Image (spheres, helix red, strand yellow):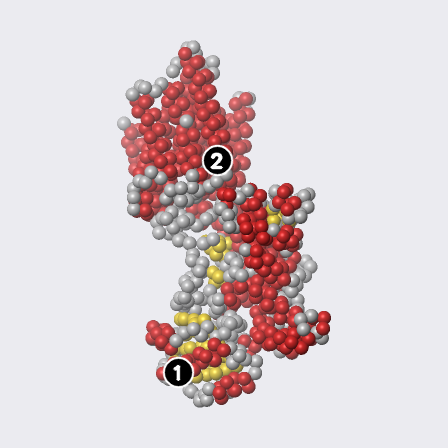
Amino acid sequence: MTLRILSFLFAVMLACLPLTTAANAQQPPSFHDFKRISILHEGRVKPLDSYARAMLKELSGKENIAGQTAIEWLARALFDPAAATDEPVFLIPDAALRAMLDLPQDRRHFSLSAIAPGLQKTAAQVSALMQQETSALTQQQQELLRLHEDALRHAALLRSVSLILPLEAELPEWIARQENETAAKNFLTLFKYKPDLMTRMKAVIKAKGGDPQHYNAEEQKTAVLAFSLEGLQAAGAAGGDFRVIPTDMAGAGELVTPWSIFTQGLGGPKTAESFTLWQKMADAYRARNGEDFANAAQALAAPGHDLEIAYNLIKPFHVALILYVLALTIAVAAALRPQLPLPASWLVMAGGFAAHLFGIAARVMILERPPVGTLYESVLFVSMICAFLTLLFTARRRRVDILIAGNACAAGLLAMAPALLQRGDSMDMLAAVLNTNFWLATHVLCITAGYGLCIMAACLAQLWLLFKTQRTSRPELTLTLYNMTEVLAMAALLLTAVGTILGGIWADQSWGRFWGWDPKENGALLIVLWLVWLQHGRIAGMLSPPLLMAGIAFLNVIVALAWFGVNLLGVGLHSYGFISGIAAALALFCTLQISVIAALLFCALRNIRRGAHEG
Amino acid sequence: MKDRVLNGCIIVLLGLAGYGITLYLDGRAPRGVETQTSAPAPMHTQIPAFSFTALDGAQHDIRDFRGKIVILNFWATWCAPCQKEFPALLRIADSHKDDIVLIALSSDIERAAIDRFLNKLSYKPRANVHIALDDSQRITAGLFQTYRLPETWIIDRQQLLKHKLIGAEWTDEDLRSIIEKIQ
C-alpha cells in the first residue's frame, strides 16, 4: 500500500503537470447535455449528473463545492486536472487528523495538493493499519484510511481522460517535422513516437549521464516528452472507474474507461467515434467554447436519463421532509391555538406525501425494481406508509393529535434515512440473492408495510394512553383512537404474518431452507408473535384496554429491534443491510420509549382507578 | 353486509393489482452490468469506410471486399510479436485464396522498413494479400483506436466486425476456428 500510494500519487501529480491549464473564461459551457452522458458506475448505467453528485458527496460531504455544482466540478476535474488538484474537495472533520497531516485548523476542506505531503508522511502507518480488522481501528484511524482511499479515487478521476488532454511539452524537431501544426498534441497522438524517444534517451543518457542540465535543447525536449508520456502511461495503467466509452467488444450497454481502450486493446470504430467527441468536448471546455462543448455533449448524451436528473434536482425526499415538518408545526400551533386553520396542516402534509410518492415512484422507474431493496429504501417506504395512513385517518375529520403523531413519525423516519446510506449513490444495485422482482414486491413490501402499520399503531396507542392520563375524559376521541389502533394492529398482523411466510418461501428457494432461526427471521417472527399474543389477550379478556394499548405501543421497540437491531449483529444468511454505529441511538430510543410507555400506563391506570376514566 | 362486500372487493382488487405489478416488473430488474470484460464477444458493428494504397500502388476501398472474409491486421516491423504472427496470417490467407482477404496495415514511419522485412521473409505478392503503409496511423489509431500492436480484426462477408485478436498469442487453429464459425 505504501508503494502503491506513493507511486500512484506521484505518477498522477506528475501526469497532471505536463497538461496545460485551461484558458481563461470566454463563454462558460452549458452542462445540460454533459450531465446526460452515460457512465457505468457501481454496476448501474447512470447519468454523469448522478455520478458527479455521489462522488463529490463522498469526498466533500456536499453536492456543491467552491461555488461549483457537482457536474461543474466533475467537468473541471476531467478537463482541467492541473487546476482541479488545488480545489478543496476533501473533508477532514477531525482536528487531530488535520494536525497529524500538518494541515491548518481553520478549515475542514482541503485540496489534493494540500493533503499530498501528509498522505506521503502517513503512508507507512496506513500500510500497517490495512493489515488490521476495521473493528479494531479507532475512529481517527478509520478516517485516515478513508482519506487515503478517497485521495486515490480522486487522483484516478483526474487522469480519466488525460490521454486526450494537450501536453505542455515542446516537441523535438524530428517529431515536429512529422506532425501537423494544427493536429492535437496529446498522449494518443504522440504515443507512436515513444519507442524512438526511449531509444534516443538511452543513447543520450549513455553519452551524457542522467542530469538534463548537461543536455542540449533538443535533448531536453526529448527527455521531457519521454518522461511525460511515461508518467501518463504509468498513471493510466493504474486503472479507474470512469466507464463512459461504449465499446464494440462486448454486449450492448457495456461501457469502458478511456484508458482501457489503450491498455487493454478495447478500441474499435465505436470507441473512435466516442473519443472524437470527448476530444472535442475537452478542447471546447479548455477554450471556454460553450457552443462546441454543448454540441459534442449533445452527441454523447444518452436518452432516458431525464427522470433521474429531475430526481436529483428536485430532491423529493428533502421536499417531503420540509413539508412534513411544516405540517407538524402548523398542527402543533393549531393544537395550542384552535383558531388556527388545522386543514392547512393536512394540505401541507398531502403535498409532502405527493413529493414522497414521486420520489419512490421515480426510484422504481429508474432502478426498474420494486421500491424496497435496501435499509435506506425501507425507511423511505415506511415513512410514506405512516404519512399515507395519517392522511387517510384524518381525511374526513381533521384530528390534530393524529396529524401531530403522523407528521412526527413520517418526518422522523425521513430525517433518519440518510444516516443509513452507505457511501456513494443511494440507488445501489442489489446483491444477486435480493434482485428478484417478485419477492421484492411481495415479501419485502409486506414486511415494510407491516412495519409502517405497527409504528402508526404504536403512536396512536401512545396517544390513547396520553388522553387517558388527562383529568378530563374525552370518550369520543379515545374511542376513535382505540378503534383505529385496533384496525392497524390487525392489519399489521396480517401483513407481517404473510410477509414472514413469504420470506420463508423465498429463503427456501434461495438457500434451500424455509427457516433457519436467522436474526432477521426471528425479528419478523417476534412482531407476529407479539401481535398474536396481544390479540389473544384482548379476545380472552385478559388484557384490559390500557394494557392492550401499552402492548401495542411497545411495538415501536419491537419493530426497532427487528428492523435495525438485528443488522447490528452482522451474522446470519441474511447478510445484507448490516450496519454499525447506531447501537447507542437504538438503545436510547428503546429506553425512551419504554420509559414513556411505562409512565403513560402508570398514569392512565391511576386515573382509571380514580374513576376519572372508564377502562 | 354491504360494507363487507365492498371491503372484500377492495381486498381482492388490491391483491390482483399487486400480482399484476409484480408480473410486470418481474424479470425487468437489471442484474447489474459486468464490469470485467472476458474474451472478446461477437459484435455487430459495421466496418467504417476507408481506403488505402497498397505497396504495389493499387488503390483499394474496404467496400471492394464485400462478399469475402477480411482479416484486417495492424502491425509494424518494429513490433516483435507482429513479425512473429505475420507468417501465420499469410498461411491462413494462402489456405483460403478465394474466400479470405488479408489487409496488413503497417504503422511504420518509412516504407523501407517494410520492404526490408518482406525481403527477409522472401515474401511473394498474393492477389488476396494487401500490405500498406498507414500514414500517420490514420486508420490504425484514427478509425480503429489501435495503439498497441498487433491487433487483428476478423470481418465477415457483410462487413460486420465479428472478432478481434489482441496481441499475437493465437495459433493457426484459433484463427481457423474463428473463420469457420463466420463461414
Circle 2 chain: A
Specify whether residue A26 is in view. yes
Q: Where is residue B4 in the image (x, y as percent from the top left)?
A: 29, 29
**In the picture, residue A290 is in which quadrant?**
bottom right
Q: Residue at x 37, y 44 (%)?
A: A573
Q: Which residue is drawn at 43% across and 33% down?
A: A560
Q: Which residue is drawn at 63% across and 62% down?
A: A14
Compared across the picture, whether A132 is left or right of A89 comes to left
Split into 4 quadrants, where in the image is the C terminus of chain A?
top left
Q: Name the residue under label 2.
A: A583
Asked whether the beta carbons under mark 2 and mark 1 sit within 8 Å of each other, the answer is: no
Circle 1 chain: B
For this rendering, which residue is in front, A220 or A415?
A220
Against A236, is A442 above or below? above
Amino acid under disc 1: Arg
Density class for disc 1 (Cα within 10 Å; few <14, some 14-19, many ≥20) is few
Q: Mark 1 points at which residue?
A: B91
Q: Position of residue A391 (x, y in %)?
A: 44, 31
**Quick one: which residue is furthest to the top in this view?**
A610
Specify whether residue A346 is in view. no
Density class for disc 2 (Cα within 10 Å; few <14, some 14-19, many ≥20) is some
Q: Is mark 1 on a helix, strand or loop?
A: helix
Q: Is mark 2 on a helix, strand or loop?
A: helix
Question: Between tags 2 and 1, which lies in front?
Answer: 2
For this rendering, which residue is in front, A152 or A81?
A152
**In the picture, residue B95 is in which quadrant?**
bottom left
